[in-house]
Amino acid sequence: MQEVIMSTDMTIQRKLEILTDAAKYDVACTSSGVDRKGKRGMIGNAAACGICHSFAADGRCISLLKILFTNECIFDCKYCINRSSNDVPRASFTPDEVCRLTIEFYKRNYIEGLFLSSGILKSPSFTMELIYETIRKLREEYHFNGYIHVKAIPGADKDIIEKTGFLADRMSINLELPTAEGLKNLAPHKTRKTILTPMRQIQTGITANKNELMLYRHAPQFVPAGQSTQMIVGATPENDFQLISVAEALYNNYSLKRVFYSAFVAVNKDKMLLDTPNGPMLLREHRLYQADWLLRFYGFNASELLNEQRPNFNVLLDPKADWAVRHLEYFPVEVNKADYNTLLRVPGIGVRSARRIIAARRSMQLGFDELKRLGVVLKRAAYFITCKGKMMYPIRIEENSITNHLIYDDRKKLLDISGGNEFRQMSLFEDYNVNVPPTIEEKKSIVFGEM
């Protein structure tokens, strides 16, 4: 029998333990994405980059009070710890308990905002109504003016989603799995239609609200920080090309702010789930985040990074460096002449350093010392650029040679690669099955997007 703990049976501390632990697989490493100044009579504000961040040992970003309203659930998704058939402790907050927790944590400077998700209690609309009531109380009765990220419940009544959107800063609806077949096999209660319908509703509402704000400056804002989604990586056999192609389509068709990738953690035993004997594929997750930055800010398309013949990212190189060594016909690039978009394709030159280069060379010819001061990572960029017609080192412009130089020493040791062309012994089609940890530099790249 399941251990069902209702509001009268336990302390709020015990509920917090259960419902924060139940929420840890829901990824939300965003900063606020919205500017809102403090108001008289209210508590807190929200700044575009104002949420305090801390980083877990595996590189995940922790910034919000992240809880489930309830881990009770009528659904039986095979990958979920809170599935209805699991024998786990259950708990549910009341709206006032969530409000009090948020305010008390905020007053102690532990958090700058709230991330609220939920299992499905009775029905999607019933659960969404409870979430709405919680956010309404937090805004109107507890006068909380800080950042709030709410998970919209697929299948909930559209009117409840709409009125919640006028109170939340960001909303998200988890796509969960990249293909309809994956959903059918692992989450039969969910469909692409029930997920994409509210996603389209939120997109349409954001667009209409922006038009209204152009006419009426003081109109209430609808989801001002935009919407996001999450995909589980490794629970089903989709390759990286399929994953980033789905992400690209979501950015283009639904105007999403972020797609989050969550390495599958085998919390349940089920024959329909892929076996992950070595734990979650954290490096694969990192590669997808790195590629995601390339799609959003570096001008890359999914089909440039991968294709059906080369469907998975290389564990040895980040996606930008891997693209560069496979397209050496574009290099070396002369930094004193190349345009902004060309500079963005050079490994080691990020968005900020590319802008600095464009600005600095208006008044001087740049050398390697100047590039280092501008933030260029020369240990990667040196193989792909020239300054005043010269390369930093005498390097052969040849794929095997440059790749061997780019692979970090710790990664070589971990994979027992001694040098030469031995990195070629491992097929790129098998790379993502090698479970190696991400380096410190790779962890930084998925947070700040500088590659």
Image (cartoon, rainbow, N blue to C red):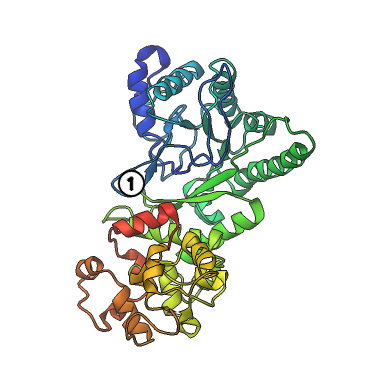
Residue position marked by numbered label 1 in the rendering: 269
In the displayed structure image, the side of residue 50 where residue 5 appears, left or right? left
Residue 9 is situated, as x and y percent measured from the top left of the image, at 36, 13
- Residue extending furthest toward the top: 8
- Residue extending furthest toward the front: 363
Can you see residue 274? no
Looking at the image, residue 168 lies above or below residue 422? above
Could you tell me the amino acid type at mark 1? Lys
Residue 186 is situated, as x and y percent measured from the top left of the image, at 47, 48
Instruction: Name the residue at 29% across, 78% down.
Output: 404
Within the image, what quadrant is residue 233 found in?
bottom left
Looking at the image, residue 309 lies above or below residue 281? below
Residue 112 is situated, as x and y percent measured from the top left of the image, at 45, 31
Q: How many marks?
A: 1
Residue 51 is situated, as x and y percent measured from the top left of the image, at 45, 37
Instruction: Name the residue at 38% across, 34% down.
Output: 22
